[in-house]
Amino acid sequence: MDKHRSAADGGVDALIQFQTGRGHRQFAAQIKAVDRFRTPAQVKAQLGGHRALPMLVAPFISRQTAEHCRKLHLSFLDTAGNAYLEAPGLYVYITGHPRPKDAGESKFRAVGAAGLQVSFALLSRPELVHAPYREIAQDAEAALGTITHVMRDLEARGILAGGRRRRMLDPRRLLEEWVTHYPIALRPKLHPRRFEASQEQLAQADLKRLGACWSGELAAQRLTQFLKPAGFTIYTHKAVNGLVAALRLRANPTGNLEVLDAFWNFEPDPEFPDLVPPVLAYADLLATRDGRNIEAANLIYEQRIEPAFRALQTAH
């Protein structure tokens, strides 16, 4: 097996080659932790245009995820010895090896709950990268000590350049990392609650006055004019009681509205004062695994997030 780094191949971390009885079989690999069930499909889509076969390389692949990869025809390798390789003249399927002790939670400070709040502030307000740590802490609603640890982590991994001329080197990588870890490490800590609500009542709601903002499908509709919302997501900066009373919400574990605590402390976009920052709407839509929501998320990325990244790089 030969492994070659290939920076020219978009989205490819390595090219892995196997010798079989029917010749060489080459795979284009992405290396990442599988923190969400949708990660294999995302990897396959990102590698779909490559000349080599797609492959996921991860610290650990569970039985369930292995079967999901097999159904997707996405080859994988992990550090526990689990593997699935499928190509002409090559078929390997090994599952059941337990998670290695060192393949657990990431030691990177930027992907813990508090670190994700800092990364979110930097992604949503790129100018913050030049600000004093105290200002970053205030906008991220994080402790000052957290900022130091997170910034050192991002510098050590080449996402951020430190020193007097601090700047973002790889915002796209930071976004991918944030979107991957947010649903696992931070979102469950935001006290998600489910309610049933009248769509007519929601349509008339003045969330800015209530100290809240839309995410998910309704945010996508406002940002892209693409999606007709069926489910609703609200983040609130205030106690939920006021929102419940104003919108006449009824607690329901399978209701059409999810309410979560807001976790940032900076002003909204004046153009969309009742929407969450696009980065959060993007993440919430991807997490649903719904095809139309993922399409809407991609539009938000293309129309709102990517242009901001380009402007950031031009400014440097």
Image (tube, rainbow, N blue to C red):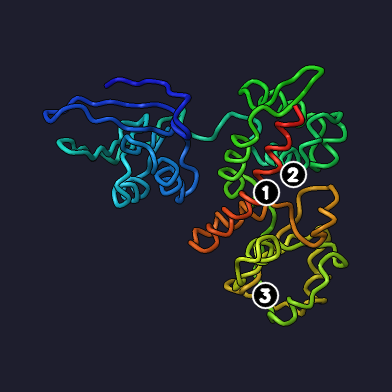
Q: Quadrant of residue 77?
A: top left
Q: Secondary structure at mark 2?
A: helix
Which one is earlier in the sequence, the residue at label 2 or at label 1?
2
Q: Nearer the viewer, mark 2 or mark 3?
A: 2
Given the image, on which type of amino acid does mark 1 rest? Val
Q: 117 or 14: which is nearer to us?
A: 14
Q: Which mark is residue 124?
A: 2
Residue located at (67% from left, 49% from top):
279
Q: Examine the rendered structure and indicate whether residue 40 appears above or below residue 239.
A: above
Q: 97 or 236: which is nearer to us?
A: 236
Q: Examine the rendered structure and indicate whether residue 280 appears above or below residue 174.
A: below
Q: Secondary structure at mark 1?
A: helix
Q: Examine the rendered structure and indicate whether residue 262 appears above or below residue 241.
A: above
142 left or right, relative to 54: right
Given the image, on which type of amino acid does mark 2 rest? Ser
Which one is earlier in the sequence, the residue at label 1 or at label 3?
3
Q: CA distance from mark 2 to mark 1?
A: 7 Å
Q: CA distance from mark 2 to mark 3?
A: 31 Å
Residue at the limit of the structure toward the top, as seen here: 163
Residue at the limit of the structure toward the front, as seen here: 314
294 left or right, relative to 282: left
Disc 3: CA contacts within 10 A as few (<14), some (14-19) or many (>=20): some
Q: Nearer the viewer, mark 1 or mark 3?
A: 1
Which one is earlier in the sequence, the residue at label 2 or at label 3?
2
Residue on which the image places disc 3: 251
Given the image, on which type of amino acid does mark 3 rest? Ala
Residue on which the image places disc 1: 279
Asked whether disc 2 touches disc 1, contact meaning CB atoms under 8 Å apart, the reply is yes
* Quarter of the rendering occupied by the C terminus: top right
Residue located at (69% from left, 81% from top):
198
Residue located at (46% from left, 26% from top):
8
